[in-house]
Image (spheres, rainbow, N blue to C red):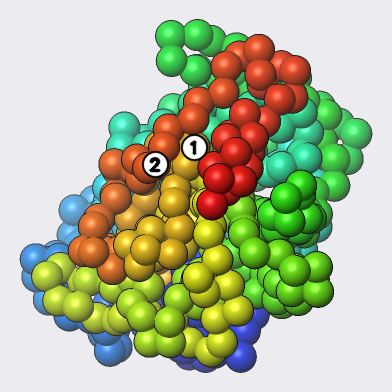
């Protein structure tokens, strides 16, 4: 096998590192599978330093024993590719990290299609796995069938069309939820002590990653639903429109934003921050491996700003919210955020498969790690069930009222 273009540029002219949805580029190692005798070989490339504690070589004789026993006793058909894919999936799962996954070529194509904003057919949810291995909703996409059906962030998915999700990865669950437009999928959800069954009709999902409007009192409203490679351009257009209309106050809505490209979060944060101000740092173990700083112009600097977050705000959305908060550029309002403080990267292989692997934890300018904890807003605003049912956006109203006094 050839390693191929290991350090590839993903959808951008510069290397992109991703949080939650999208991941980075520089390789730590390449996993080569030698199919002849079922042995595995690790070929080390450059990286951040080995802190796993793993030995340089492993005796795989016990793996061969399991393989031989399976081959001689299993009552069914198996292919060498099934076995190899199972081994690769198992290696990634052995990390015990819900964000470290192996993708077959087909799985990688679906995953990258989601990251690149390609229209998919499904119900419009971003999925994750919690510390117990349960498949949970990170956030429903605004305007999607899932959102219309009442799916909420942090809902645990118990079954998909009657099939239990126990032991299922988030990517496997996503593949089972997707399907042709107009078809239905039934989910059983666990929400606290309540169990819900929802049947949702699939549709094409293609939502702009940013939108804007001008509210009363000259407040500019900017909603970012995901940090993608086109997001910054859309936000720049919105800022230009704000300037034309004399906007002096801004609401940045990051609710139900599951994250995305770190570079996009850096660019958007830079609109408010002084040049070279720290946006966030990455640490591999205790070592600082990268620092992201504000760059370019800052047309929104000094404008009173509220950042709205909720339980569906994760990763790159949390990076942006904390960068603006720690640099005294914004007040955070809403509900406690998701709490994803780690960064992944994708290592592509020559056959089209990929390994998504956690490479670092990220820290806010004040040195805060929100992993598994989330951001507690400066002002907590929790909508009532009646508000949700009647489509009354109390959080947006609270942000407007706050800025009207500025």
Q: Which mark is residue 334?
A: 1
In this rendering, position of residue 1 left or right of residue 326: right
Give the percent coordinates (x, y) of residue 219. 69, 54
Disc 1 crowd, CA 10 A, few/some/many (<14, 14-19, 20+): many
Q: Residue at the spot x=71%, y=16% of the render? A: 389
In this rendering, position of residue 62 left or right of residue 385: left
Quadrant of the image occupied by residue 209: bottom right
**Vertically, is 12 above or below 144?**
below
Give the percent coordinates (x, y) of residue 259. 52, 57
Q: Residue at the spot x=78%, y=55% of the render? A: 214
Residues 269 and 14: in front is 269
Residues 352 and 141: in front is 141
**Vertically, is 193 above or below 304?**
above
How many marks the image carries: the answer is 2
Q: Tell me, yes or no, if residue 91 can be seen here.
A: yes
Quadrant of the image occupied by residue 182: top right
Q: Which mark is residue 377?
A: 2
Asked if disc 1 and disc 2 are in contact, CB closer than 8 Å, the reply is yes
Give the percent coordinates (x, y) of residue 250. 62, 58
Q: Residue at the spot x=57%, y=23% of the render? A: 383
Work out which residue is located at the far top of the displayed protein and give it.
194
In this rendering, position of residue 131 left or right of residue 221: left
Element type where label 1 sits in the image? strand
Disc 2 crowd, CA 10 A, few/some/many (<14, 14-19, 20+): many
Real-space CA distance between mark 1 and mark 2, rounded to the nearest whole angstrom: 6 Å
Q: Residue at the spot x=43%, y=87% of the render? A: 275
Element type where label 2 sits in the image? loop
């Amino acid at each position: 096998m050839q390693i191929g273009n290991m350090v590839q540029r993903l959808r951008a002219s510069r290397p992109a590192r991703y949080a939650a949805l999208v991941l980075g580029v520089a390789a730590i190692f390449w996993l080569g599978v030698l199919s002849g005798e079922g042995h595995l070989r690790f070929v080390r490339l450059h990286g951040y330093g080995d802190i796993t504690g793993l030995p340089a070589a492993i005796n795989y004789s016990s793996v061969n024993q399991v393989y031989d026993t399976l081959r001689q006793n299993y009552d069914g058909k198996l292919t060498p590719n099934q076995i190899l894919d199972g081994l690769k999936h198992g290696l990634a799962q052995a990390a015990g990290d819900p964000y470290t996954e192996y993708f077959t070529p087909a799985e990688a194509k679906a995953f990258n299609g989601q990251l690149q904003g390609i229209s998919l057919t499904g119900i419009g949810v971003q999925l994750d796995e919690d510390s117990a291995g349960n498949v949970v909703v990170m956030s429903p996409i605004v305007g999607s069938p899932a959102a219309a059906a009442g799916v909420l962030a942090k809902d645990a998915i118990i079954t998909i069309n009657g099939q239990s999700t126990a032991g299922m990865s988030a990517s496997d669950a996503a593949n089972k939820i997707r399907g042709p437009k107009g078809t239905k999928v039934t989910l059983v959800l666990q929400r606290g002590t309540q169990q819900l069954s929802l049947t949702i009709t699939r549709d094409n999902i293609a939502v702009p990653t940013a939108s804007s409007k001008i509210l009363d009192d000259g407040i500019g409203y900017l909603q970012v639903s995901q940090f993608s490679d086109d997001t910054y351009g859309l936000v720049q257009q919105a800022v230009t429109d704000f300037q034309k209309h004399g906007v002096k106050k801004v609401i940045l809505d990051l609710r139900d934003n599951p994250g995305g490209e770190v570079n996009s979060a850096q660019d958007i944060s830079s609109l408010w921050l002084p040049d070279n101000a720290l946006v966030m740092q990455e640490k591999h173990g205790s070592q600082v491996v990268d620092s992201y700083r504000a760059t370019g112009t800052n047309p929104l600097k000094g404008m009173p700003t509220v950042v709205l977050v909720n339980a569906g705000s994760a990763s790159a959305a949390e990076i942006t919210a904390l960068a603006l908060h720690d640099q005294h550029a914004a007040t955070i309002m809403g509900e406690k955020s998701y709490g994803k403080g780690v960064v992944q990267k994708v290592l592509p292989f020559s056959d089209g498969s990929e390994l998504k692997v956690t490479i670092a934890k990220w820290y806010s300018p004040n040195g805060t790690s929100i992993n598994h904890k989330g951001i507690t807003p400066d002002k907590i605003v929790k909508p009532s069930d009646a508000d949700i049912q009647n489509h009354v956006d109390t959080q947006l109203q609270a942000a407007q009222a706050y800025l009207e006094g500025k």
